Image (cartoon, rainbow, N blue to C red):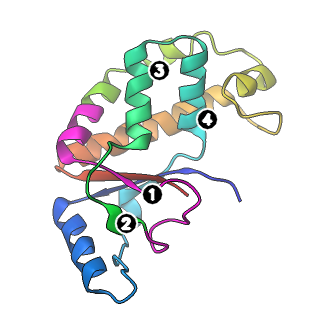
């Protein structure tokens, strides 16, 4: 089973509703079910972009931004989401990005010149896949794959910021 990067944008009120449900449920189930339009799966793309940025010594602020966008912030009091109803438990539990953090990340993502970042991405699929840590089994256009998923993540964070939503991140 392949692991992928997951995101959910939720209101602070929904987060509190899940917290109450987990506290009141015999199995500590948070009744987690964000709508499909408020979820995003970026596959391995952002992990690959992050690896590529580290390898080419990209701007440290960009590396920090990407890492924060997919890893969340420490703390956040969302231990109740450490439940099989939310994720499979293979990697660390879900982490929270508050509405203020989401707004900061959205602003920073909006300013990223991704084409500039990818200027030195090798031209062949095999070399580009290796630079991103995808290995030999990757099929398709690496640049298009990175751009597609980065753009989706940027739009996702922008939407969350516009509505004052939090973002929960996890690997599943």
In the rendered image, which residue does mark 4 sit on? 145
Q: Position of residue 140 (x, y in %)?
A: 74, 35
* Label 2 Cα crowd, 10 Å radius (few <14 / some 14-19 / many 20+): many
Point 30% across, 60% down: residue: 78
Q: Quadrant of the C terminus?
A: bottom right
Q: Alpha-carbon distance for marks 1 and 4?
A: 26 Å
How many marks on residues?
4
Q: Quadrant of the N terminus?
A: bottom right
User: Element type at marker 3?
Assistant: helix
Q: Is residue 101 on the magenta stretch?
A: yes
User: Element type at marker 2?
Assistant: helix
Mark 2 or mark 3: which comes first in sequence? 2
Check contact, mark 2 vs mark 1: CB within 8 A. yes
Q: Position of residue 125 (x, y in %)?
A: 77, 25
* Label 3 Cα crowd, 10 Å radius (few <14 / some 14-19 / many 20+): some
Mark 2 or mark 4: which comes first in sequence? 2
Point 43% across, 12% down: residue: 59
Label of residue 9 in the image: none
In the rendered image, which residue does mark 3 sit on? 114
Check contact, mark 2 vs mark 4: CB within 8 A. no
Q: Is residue 101 left or right of residue 49?
A: left
* Label 1 Cα crowd, 10 Å radius (few <14 / some 14-19 / many 20+): some
Q: Alpha-carbon distance for marks 3 and 4?
A: 12 Å
**Is 51 rendered above or below residue 58?**
below
Viewer-nearest of discs 1 and 3: 1
Q: Position of residue 5 (x, y in %)?
A: 52, 48
In the rendered image, which residue does mark 2 sit on? 81
Q: Is residue 69 on the magenta stretch?
A: no
User: Element type at marker 1?
Assistant: loop
Q: Is residue 74 left or right of residue 82?
A: left
Check contact, mark 3 vs mark 4: CB within 8 A. no
Q: Which residues are magenta?
A: 83-106
């Amino acid at each position: 089973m392949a692991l992928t990067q997951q995101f959910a944008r939720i209101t602070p009120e929904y987060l509190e509703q899940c917290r109450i449900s987990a506290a009141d449920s015999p199995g500590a189930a948070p009744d987690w079910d964000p709508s499909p339009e408020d979820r995003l799966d970026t596959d391995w793309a952002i992990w690959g972009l992050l690896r590529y940025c580290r390898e080419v010594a990209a701007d440290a602020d960009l590396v920090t931004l990407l890492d924060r966008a997919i890893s969340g912030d420490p703390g956040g009091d969302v231990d109740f989401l450490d439940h099989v109803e939310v994720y499979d438990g293979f990697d660390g539990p879900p982490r929270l990005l508050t509405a203020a953090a989401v707004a900061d990340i959205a602003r920073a993502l909006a300013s990223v010149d991704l084409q500039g970042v990818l200027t030195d991405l090798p031209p062949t699929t095999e070399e580009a896949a290796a630079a991103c840590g995808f290995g030999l089994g990757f099929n398709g256009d690496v640049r298009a794959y990175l751009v597609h998923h980065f753009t989706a993540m940027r739009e996702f964070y922008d939407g969350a910021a516009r509505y004052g939503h939090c973002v929960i991140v996890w690997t599943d």
